[in-house]
Image (tube, rainbow, N blue to C red):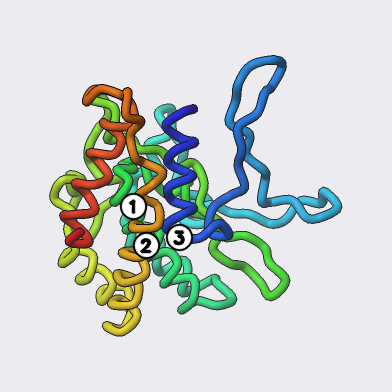
Amino acid sequence: MRNEFLSLRWVAAVLGKKEVTDFALGQVDGVHALVVTRFDRGSKGEKLRLEDCAQILVKPRGADYGGKYDSTYEEIAEIIKAHSALPQVDLARFYRRLITFALIGNCDAHLKNFSMLEAPRGLRLSPAYDVLNTAFYKNFSREFGLELLGKRRQIETLDGELFRQFGVAIGLNPRTIDTVFEDLKRGVRKAAVLIQPPEAEGQDGFVNRFADIVRNQCLRILGE
C-alpha cells in the first residue's frame, strides 16, 4: 500500500492530477487501506463503457494471466489511433505516461493497465491506474512489461534516445516528442519533494530506496 500510494502521488505530480485515478488513504473495516475511486462510473453511479487493451486485442487470460504480457507498446498505440475520439491527443498522453512508468520503475505496465473509457465525445484513454514501483522489489522481474521497438527490455536499458525512437515509430512528430520531454522534466522537478527522504531515515529506508530508483531512471531517460 505504501509503495502504490507514493507511486500514484509521484505520477500524479508529474503528469497532472487529472491523468491519474482519484485515490486517498483511508480505512476499510478498521484497516488502513488505499482507497481508489472508480472512473468507470458516471455522476449518478451509472456504468461507463471501459475496455482494457487485453480485451480489445482479444488476448486470452490463461491460467497464469499471461495474455496481458503478449503484446507490444506499439499495439497499444495502434488501438488508440483506431478507437480514440481524439487520437493524436491520446497518443501523446499514452507516450508521456509510458515514459513516466519507466521513470518510476513500473515494470508491470501490461495490456490490462491501459484502457479506453467512454467519454461524452467517444472513447478516450482512461486515467492511469494500478501504478507501482516494482523495481523496488528484488524478487520482481526488471523486464519492462511489453515489447518496445521489437524486443523485451530490462528497465535499466531504457533511455531517452530509445523513447524518442519509439515516439517516431508510433507516429508522433519531433515537436510533440520534444514537448513531452520538457513537460516531464518540469513535472519531475515539481514531484521531487514527494520522494525526499526523512532526515531520520537510513540509506536502506523505504523512501531512500524508492527515491534512488526514480532518480537513476530520471537521469538515464531525461538527463536529470
Name the residue beneath numbered marker 1: 71
Q: Which residue is mark 3?
A: 15
User: Pointer 2 and pointer 1: residues touching (CB < 8 Å)?
Assistant: yes
Q: Position of residue 46 (x, y in %)?
A: 81, 51
Residue 78, how many percent across, how many down?
41, 69
Viewer-proximal residue, 70 or 110?
A: 110
Find numbered disc 1 in the image and state the secondary structure of the residue it sits on: loop
Amino acid at the residue labelled 3: Leu
Residue at figure coordinates x 62%, y 39% from the top left: 36
- The residue located at (28%, 32%) in the rendering is 208
Relative depth, front residue between 3 and 206: 206
- Compared across the picture, whether 192 is left or right of 142 comes to right
Give the vertical position of 4 relative to 8 (above or below): above
Query: In screen coordinates, is 97 left or right of 147?
Result: right
Between residue 57 and residue 148, name the one nearer to us: 148
What is the distance, in whole Å, between disc 2 and disc 1 at their CAs? 7 Å
Q: Which residue is the site of mark 2?
A: 75
